[in-house]
Image (tube, rainbow, N blue to C red):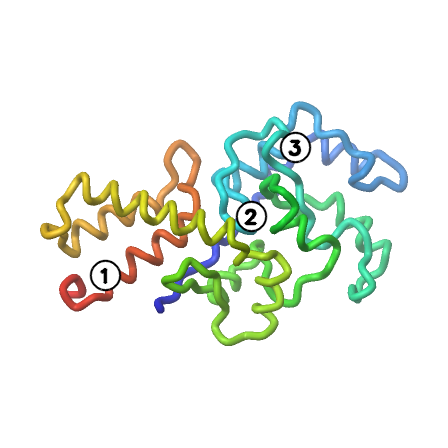
Amino acid sequence: MITIDMKYINKQIALEPQTLTLYRNTTPNANYKGFVDTDSLLKQALLNEQGYLCGYCMKKIPEANGKYVSVEHYISQEKHVDSNLTELRHSQSSLRYNNMLAVCVNNGIHCDKSRGNIPFKVLNPHHISCEQRITYSLTDKVESKNNVSVDFDIELLKLNCQNLKELRGFFWLEAKEKLKRKHPKGTWTKQIIETERQIYIDKKAGKYKAFCNYIIFRFNHLLSLPKYSK
């Protein structure tokens, strides 16, 4: 097993839509439930930051028109019994752009749907530290590095539900088949694998590939094999 980063979201306050800023600054007792995302500007800003990936599971989110994307709040809009924050802090945080991320619309099994209002122990895709806390297995699972708090958060988001594991496996097989079509397997070299891996590191037209970090992990595993490691 080789470690790989969780996708860090570099929040850019300059992308905050003026509609959100104006509502927050001019509405008495404002909270997110009263905000109307005119023309999906907020969702669009979040997706641009995230390269059109879900901020939790890294599924591809194709567009910002509301059908496939939800706005999630890292500090939940409503206080959970396990939260050590006040109800006022939760309400105020609901309108902070730096507390928001775009997540996939799913069947209720994973991500924000499974999390609800339960506070996280450790993981936060808005903090660079998340990049050192997550790894994968060769069986398509997300894993911690022997950290029970990270294990809790992975389970909270149901990142190892059957659907997500199957999707990771599918996209890795697809990536490998693309490599085979370009270069028959017996001709692979370290440079060829590194070049193919770069496709999943970089954005293309502002978008990342679905489950790119898992695919990078699998390419890194190939590169660790003796025949490619030199």
Whole-percent x, y for residue 106 in the image? 60, 41
Rounded to the nearest whole Å, what is the CA distance between mark 1 and mark 2? 27 Å
2 or 3: tag closer to the N-terminus: 3
Q: Quadrant of the C terminus?
A: bottom left
As drawn, the residue found furthest toward the right would be 28
Residue in view at x 66 percent, y 49 percent: 112
The residue that mark 1 highlights is 223
The residue that mark 2 highlights is 55
Q: Please state which of the two labelled residues, at mark 2 or mark 3, is closer to the viewer.
A: 2
Three-letter residue code for mark 1: Leu
Three-letter residue code for mark 2: Gly
SS of the residue at dot 1? Answer: helix
Count residues near mark 3 (Cα–Cα under 10 Å), then give few for <14, some for 14-19, many for 20+: some
Q: Which mark is residue 89?
A: none
Residue in view at x 50 percent, y 67 percent: 133
Whole-percent x, y for residue 29 in the image? 89, 42
Three-letter residue code for mark 3: Pro
Residue in view at x 51 percent, y 59 percent: 128
Count residues near mark 2 (Cα–Cα under 10 Å), then give few for <14, some for 14-19, many for 20+: many
The residue that mark 3 highlights is 17
1 or 2: tag closer to the N-terminus: 2
Q: Nearer the viewer, residue 69 or 21?
A: 69
SS of the residue at dot 2? Answer: loop
3 or 1: tag closer to the N-terminus: 3
